[in-house]
Image: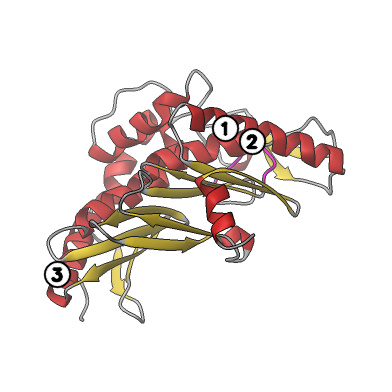
Amino acid sequence: MAMTAPVASGAVAALLPGGRLHLHHGPIDIVAEAIGEASAVRAAYARAATRFSGLLEELVAELPALRSEDAPMEGVIARRMAAAVAPFRPAFVTPMAAVAGAVAEDVLAALVGPGIRRAYANNGGDIALGLAPGERLTCALAVSGGMDRVSVASTDPARGIATSGWRGRSFSLGIAEAVTVVARTAAMADAAATMVANAVDVDAPRIRRRPARELQWDSDLGERQVTVAVPVLSPEERTAALDAGLDAAEGFRARGLIEGAALFLQGEARMTGALVLAREDRGG
């Protein structure tokens, strides 16, 4: 299969070995795959490449609104981001908490179509899934070295997987190395992973934090203290931090906002919902 449809200046759309599609522009780096008839896959990749054209510019045009809590949104992706974070208020959260998942959803929407049995768009670990009836996709959790896996069937409500933590691409108010969430959409999973990761925290003066704006002048977190270093914690401190995060995750699950979550901190883990079942299914 040759190069896909042309994309905007600065954007790249190319095939990887094995036939997956790579979409890259600025901070957006997506690996996507559609599985189905060869002609349908070619058409799907062409649609995705065309949609990717101008996508970053669309987001940049609304950045001031996306970095605020309640500004009106215009674009399709911006509105999806705002809708994903709204259920988590009145806690502080801006639409930027859902940006990677919302972008993955948008690319996935272009991939799915006639002749495509299953598809995914992986935007730096935030994954949108598309499944025709009777289909299933299995994803490994990178944070556990692939030991834990999430298998999503067409009959399951989940269609999004996202991971957040202080060592990730975005800032975190908490101390989790990673929190992976499974939810009905990738944007909702992205927002929830951010909120649960923020909740994994403990009052320990040895944890180093800095105002977000000192690290990135235009951060939507402003002067809020974000984690920059976490020393080795005591067993009691790890337990307190993970329990706080698990309480938040189980509260979100009780409200129907997520299907499951896995929380990781210094070699320890907590799981709830669908991710507990995933671990049991592999015999862990």
- List x then y, in percent, for residue 105: 31, 48
Check residue 211 for magenta coloring: no
Residue at 55% across / 27% down in the picture?
Answer: 251
Quadrant of the image for the C terminus?
A: bottom right
Is 144 displayed left or right of 43 in the figure? right
Q: Name the residue under label 3.
A: 40
Q: Position of residue 255 (x, y in %)?
A: 46, 26
- Dot 3 or dot 1, earlier in sequence: 3
Q: What residue type is labelled 2?
A: Leu
How much space separates mark 1 and mark 2, taking CA atoms?
Answer: 6 Å
Callout 3 secondary element: helix
| Residue under numbered circle 1 | 250
Q: Which of 109 and 268 is in front in this view?
A: 268
- State the colouring used for the structure image: secondary structure
Q: Do the residues labelled 3 and 1 touch (CB within 8 Å)?
A: no
User: Which x, y percent locates residue 252?
Assistant: 51, 30
Label 2 or label 3, whichever lies nearer to me, is: 2
Report whether residue 278 is seen: yes
Position of 44 with respect to 149 (left or right) is left
Of 106 and 185, the residue lying toward us = 185
Circle 3: residue type: Ala
> Mostly what secondary structure, the magenta segment?
loop
Percent coordinates x, y for residue 1 in the rendering: 21, 81
What residue appears at the point 23 percent right and 57 percent down from the top-left corner? 132
Position above or below: 100 against 241: below
- Which of 64/85 is in front? 85
Quadrant of the rendered image containing residue 256: top left
N-term-proximal mark, 2 vs 3: 3
Q: Are marks 1 and 2 in contact (CB under 8 Å)?
A: yes
Amino acid identity at mark 1: Glu
Magenta extent: 169-176
Q: Name the residue under label 2.
A: 246
